[in-house]
Image: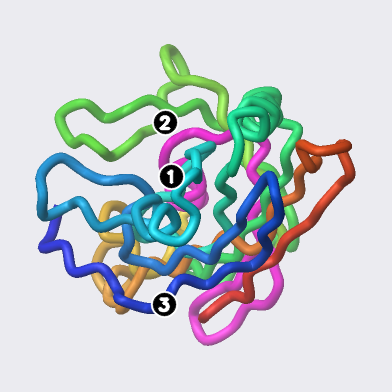
Amino acid sequence: MTDYNPPQDPLVILHDDHEVVLVDKPSGLLSVPGKGEHLADCLMARVKAVFPQALLIHRLDRDTSGVMIFALTPHAQRHLGLQFEKRQTKKTYVARVWGEMAEKTGTVDLPLIVDWPNRPKQMVDHENGKQAVTDWRVLRAGNGETRVRLMPKTGRSHQLRVHMLALGHPILGDPFYAEGPAGDFPRLMLHSETLQFRHPDGGQGMRITAKCPF
């Protein structure tokens, strides 16, 4: 891991009530603490400073920005944890990728496994990998890059990064998978834009959005 200098932006709360709080995670901030005191600053700690009862449900990669949900009660944590496990939540991401994509929409269905010698990198492995599926749709293309909306059907580690790389269009600014000029950006151009879920109190459908910063 490169030197960890997380952004010091104030916490952006997108929604909070008696069961859940949703925040907009900045790029460069860990979701949960890493090993060692120097990796203690994370979104979880910052949320707990405001909501001491906050409980973890899922996480985003350090370099990814966007919507993250935390539970404020054990009931909400169980309820939402099951929704994630059963793939009942829906997430959409926005990414800027290298090259201009020829097709307008598509699906990547490539199983992934950790690339052990190069952890935390992941790789496609048709024999031993776990199923990973991503739908994508081009928003616009030009100037040698494409803005694309990504709708993961599964939640594998680095799924969107590896799937875009497999299409020949690595996500711009990706410290693990983008090479040469594609990697030469101030941040990973991947943002978790929306999260749809059922509210743990009553089951009402909710859709929370965090505006894309790039």
Q: Which residue is mark 2?
A: 124
Chain-order first, disc 2 or disc 3: 3
Q: Is residue 70 left or right of residue 59?
A: right
Kindly check if marks 1 and 2 are in contact, taking CB atoms under 8 A apart as contact: yes
Chain-order first, disc 1 or disc 3: 3
Residue at 74% across, 56% down: 105
Q: What's the distance in space between the residues labelled 1 and 3, CA to CA?
A: 31 Å
Q: Nearer the viewer, residue 24 or 161?
A: 24
Q: Position of residue 80 (x, y in %)?
A: 67, 33
Tell me, yes or no, whether the highlighted magenta stretch contains residue 142: yes
Residue at 30% across, 76% down: 8
- Residue 181, by quadrant, is bottom left
Q: Which residue is mark 3?
A: 10
Q: What's the distance in space between the residues labelled 1 and 2, CA to CA?
A: 8 Å
Q: Which residue is mark 1?
A: 162
Residue range of the region highlighted in magenta in the rendering = 138-167
Q: Amino acid at mark 2?
A: Val
